[in-house]
Amino acid sequence: MITDSVQGAVARRRRILVVDDIEDSRELYAFYLNHVGYHVTVALDGETAIELAQQQRFDVIVMDLAMPKMDGVEATRRLKTDERTRQIPIIIVSGHAMQGLAGAARAAGAEGYCMKPCSPETLEREIERVLAGGSAPRPD
């Protein structure tokens, strides 16, 4: 029988792509998620996120919305229409001013949502919920 702690350790070996143009947010999420056992790769924009997702295997993508080169809505849409990447769950992280964009990203196929400021612990719970196949909450 597998114990909860062993199951947690196995689940935590998952690969996460964190996409955010704000260095502080990107580093905070990457540091915390690495600390709790996830393998984290980072990207600065949607364009780079798509390239990485096409080249590597990720279990979840954590995507900011307002970014240079390609925003999170367009990146989500492209990832969800690409045969190589459409199965990767995407969690949107968005600030209050981006409510319209959050809805557009959900319509493009994002499975999860975290309102900024999103604590690393809250993001971890959302990642675990998405990995467990839970239905996405609606943004407030």
Image (spheres, helix red, strand yellow):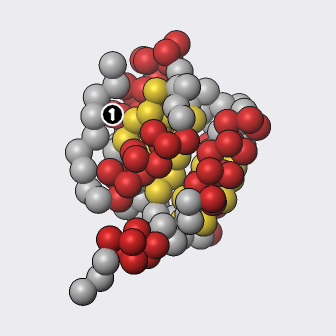
x, y percent for residue 51 = 64, 58
Residue that sits furthest to the top in the current view = 97
Residue at 55%, 42% in the rendered image: 120
x, y percent for residue 71 = 59, 33
Q: Is residue 53 visible?
A: no
Residue at 43%, 75% in the rendered image: 10
- Does 22 sit left or right of 33 as displayed? right
Q: Is residue 95 above or below residue 87?
A: above
x, y percent for residue 53 = 57, 61
Residue located beneath label 1 in the image: 107
Q: Nearer the viewer, residue 130 or 67?
A: 130
The quarter of the image holding the N terminus is bottom left
Q: Is residue 11 above or below residue 64?
A: below
Residue at 42%, 59% in the rendered image: 88
Q: Is residue 109 visible?
A: yes
- Does 31 sit left or right of 123 as displayed? right
| SS label for mark 1 | helix
Q: Is residue 115 above or below residue 122?
A: above
x, y percent for residue 133 = 26, 56
- Identity of the amino acid at label 1? Ala
Residue that sits furthest to the right in the current view = 23
Q: Nearer the viewer, residue 134 or 120?
A: 120
The quarter of the image holding the C terminus is top left
- Does 124 sit left or right of 28 as displayed? left
Residue at 42%, 51% in the rendered image: 127
